[in-house]
Amino acid sequence: MERIRLRVALAAIVIVSILTACVPIEPGAGNGEAATRSQTSSSSEPSISSSLDTSKYENVWVKAIEEVENDGRSLLRVAYPFTEHEEINARMEAVTQVFIDEYRRTAAEIEASYQEYKAETGREAATFVTHFRQHFDVSAADESLIFFDLVRSINTGGTGNAYVVGYIFDRRSGAELALPDLFVDESYLERLSVLTREALAQRVSKEELASDLDWVEDGTAPTAANFDNILLRTDDGTFLVRFDKYQVAAGVEGDVEVALPLVDIADLLKPEVRELLGIEREAEQSGTGGIETDAGYAEAGMVFAFDGARNLANLAGLSTAFPTAHSLAGPGVGLLQMFGAGRQDSLLSDESVNCQEVACVALTFDDGPSFYTDGLLDILREHDVRATFFVLGTQVRIQSETVARMFREGHQIGNHTWDHPNLTNMPDEQIQEQLRLTDDLIVQLIGEPTPFLRPPYGAYNDRVLAASGLPIIFWSVDPLDWRDRDAAIVAARIMEAPVGAIILAHDIHKSTVDAVPAIIDALRGRGIAFVTVSKLFEPEELHAQNVYKRQPDLPAEQ
Ligand code: NI
């Protein structure tokens, strides 16, 4: 793992140095000179450059494109392979172009929203950078086959995401190969399932991976979709199975990689692939020695410990009450009235909904408030829908009026930390500081602390559970709205939500906000009501140190 990361980092350094050293070969109209790359505070002229240069791999060149615009708020930096084979080049260019198009659309959209918000409100909002980067690596190559990895990172606000996509080509024909083409038959899926399950379960049990066994089992079921990203390496006798972000673990882990000895699958590879990887003899000698540990997997009993952890004695009172707009009381009322939040006769009350009798779901929004959130609140009000917002303290500080409005209009507000760190890496005091800073602001605004936590990236362990002293609200439906910025796609995924679902979404993406009216219509059409998280579980009280992913005990939709 370490070595592989190092290699990716080295590839990045090589490419960055090419980008900074090269002379642009096809500058954009009149603005491609290197000098324009240094930003001046008033300039929003885009700076565009591209180049073609040699790489460290034989017969592979680097095509690179860089764009900087919106005073540096938007940046694209991509490099992709150029080879002796036209068909390979066309494919690599096409997949890179999709990424570039996504960048341009996203950057324009975010910048327009930002400018619009500023013009309309005269207020500051959190500004978002839009940074898209891609570089590549060659993981294996001979005269017949070549494996490319495109390594991408996307940052569009509070959170960044990185992922790697592998491509395999037949160098003689230029044809792209699919993973199953490398294996003699489909039995490799079963083998990969067993091997990766065991490796991941061990990491979960050592708390090296923020996940649990159910998650691992689902993500490693022997299907082609689960194993669509595998890299076979020539240099160290391993192969790498990559799982998508959230496939087998919390998002903080990003893509999860499992490195395993090639000999463990050598007998299932086609002979020519074995030859490329130089494993023929090893395979004959050591067979499939890696899989006999299968039995130990089921017996190990490595259950991720959050069920039954109801040690509330020293946490009593911290988290078992659920303040909502309907339970206003206590010292916060003065402040609430300052913001006009004391209107208990609101027409927006969802008090009439009883989720024991009516099918319900909870719609939740993370990472805001952003400059899209007021528009979202308009939509929710128009449709008389209540949601739950997991807010970041850094955003609350800038857009406190938006948060006051959420509360006033009957939505529930949960803690998503101060600035979105991975809590599993932090000492207890820092975890508590992350929650307290945000809570202090929230209490000032609405007079109540946040009743529960959603940890950033969905990353938690026993220590986070204990240190937070709060129930953790996870989710059961993830539309991947951070990745697919398309309202129709996001809406289609959420429309399928089962009764009792906690639905994850992000109010920092315009596409997500745009999807909401269709989501409301579709789920209401199925007879499903939208409620806050605490309402979803009523009359049950949520308990500190428990993790809630859905409400399983609800009546079916009518
Ligand atoms: Ni988040």
Image (spheres, helix red, strand yellow):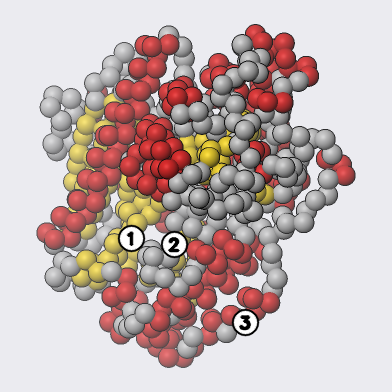
Q: Left of 207 or right of it: where is 505?
A: left
Task: Identify the residue at image location x=43%, y=91%.
Answer: 284
Distance between the alpha carbons at the discs numbered 3 and 1: 32 Å
User: Which residue bears the numbered disc 3?
Assistant: 295
Q: Compared with residue 133, is residue 554 higher up or lower down, i.e. above or below? A: below
**Within 10 Å of the Cα at label 2, are there few (<14), some (14-19), or many (20+) other Cα atoms?**
many
User: Element at badge 2?
Assistant: strand
User: Which residue bears the numbered disc 2?
Assistant: 242
Distance between the alpha carbons at the discs numbered 2 and 3: 24 Å
User: Element at badge 3?
Assistant: helix
What's under tag 3, amino acid-wise?
Answer: Ala
Sequence-wise first label, 1 or 2 = 1
Sequence-wise first label, 2 or 3 = 2
Using the rendered image of the protein, determine whether residue 211 is visible from the camera's viewpoint: yes
What's under tag 1, amino acid-wise?
Answer: Gly
Determine contact: label 1, label 2, CB under 8 Å.
yes
Task: Identify the residue at image location x=28%, y=75%.
Answer: 181
Using the rendered image of the protein, determine whether residue 460 is visible from the camera's viewpoint: no
Of 193 and 141, the residue lying toward us: 193
Q: Which mark is residue 166?
A: 1
Sequence-wise first label, 3 or 1 = 1
User: Element at badge 1?
Assistant: strand
Q: Nearer the viewer, mark 2 or mark 3?
A: 3
